[in-house]
């Protein structure tokens, strides 16, 4: 069985790997002719957003922004808009997910009784 700290570390490493890793997969599928445009093929970013939400759910303090990231991914990549998503959109979203993972690991990993995170009475 994996410890909670190791699990959180693996999930935190997995978010940018999956998010940025989906971009070359989309480009390779487009070059192979399997998909027409690599922009809307943003499944790496969507899976990365689900991973970060799961990681935020496991933390002792809940981060609302990280918990809502899958909703943002659905609104940006899945719901049809006037401007279809591009590879640049995927890059920016993956960079945002990476910044959120760093923020989540630094600010929300403390236990509730920690002196720096305790709520004054």
Image (tube, rainbow, N blue to C red):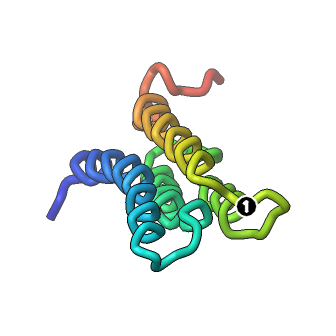
Could you tell me which residue is drawn at 41 percent across and 36 percent down?
105
Please state, as top left, top right, bottom left or bottom right, where the C terminus lies in the image. top right
The part of the image, by quadrant, that contains residue 22 is: bottom left
**103 sits to left or right of 73:** left
- Percent across and percent down for residue 28 are 39, 65
- Percent across and percent down for residue 69 are 61, 53
User: Is any part of residue 110 visible from this angle?
Assistant: no
Could you tell me which residue is drawn at 68 percent across and 69 percent down?
78
10 Å crowding of disc 1: few (<14), some (14-19), many (20+): few
Q: Secondary structure at mark 1?
A: loop
Could you tell me which residue is drawn at 17 percent across and 59 percent down?
2
The part of the image, by quadrant, that contains residue 9 is: top left
Please state, as top left, top right, bottom left or bottom right, where the N terminus lies in the image. bottom left
Taking the view exactly as shown, the residue that stands out farthest to the right is: 82
Vertical order, 96 against 44 (above or below): above
The part of the image, by quadrant, that contains residue 106 is: top left
- Percent across and percent down for residue 59 are 44, 47
**30 sits to left or right of 13:** right
Q: Which residue in the protein does label 1 denote? A: 84
Taking the view exactly as shown, the residue that stands out farthest to the bottom is: 34
Vertical order, 5 against 83 (above or below): above
- Percent across and percent down for residue 91 are 53, 45
**65 sits to left or right of 61:** right
Could you tell me which residue is drawn at 50 percent across and 67 percent down?
43
Q: Which sits in the foreground, 46 or 119?
A: 46
User: Is any part of residue 118 visible from this angle?
Assistant: yes
Q: Which sits in the foreground, 120 or 54?
A: 54
Q: Which sits in the foreground, 93 or 111?
A: 93
Count of numbered labels shown in the rendering:
1
Vertical order, 1 against 56 (above or below): below
């Amino acid at each position: 069985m994996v410890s909670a700290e190791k699990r959180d570390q693996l999930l935190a490493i997995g978010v940018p790997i999956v998010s940025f890793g989906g971009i070359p997969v989309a480009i390779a599928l487009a070059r192979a002719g399997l998909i027409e445009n690599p922009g809307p093929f943003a499944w790496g970013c969507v899976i990365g957003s689900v991973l970060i939400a799961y990681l935020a759910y496991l933390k002792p303090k809940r981060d609302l922004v990280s918990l809502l990231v899958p909703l943002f991914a659905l609104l940006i990549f899945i719901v049809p808009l006037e401007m279809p998503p591009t590879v640049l959109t995927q890059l920016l979203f993956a960079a945002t997910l990476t910044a959120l993972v760093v923020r989540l690991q630094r600010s929300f990993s403390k236990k509730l009784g920690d002196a720096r995170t305790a709520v004054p009475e």
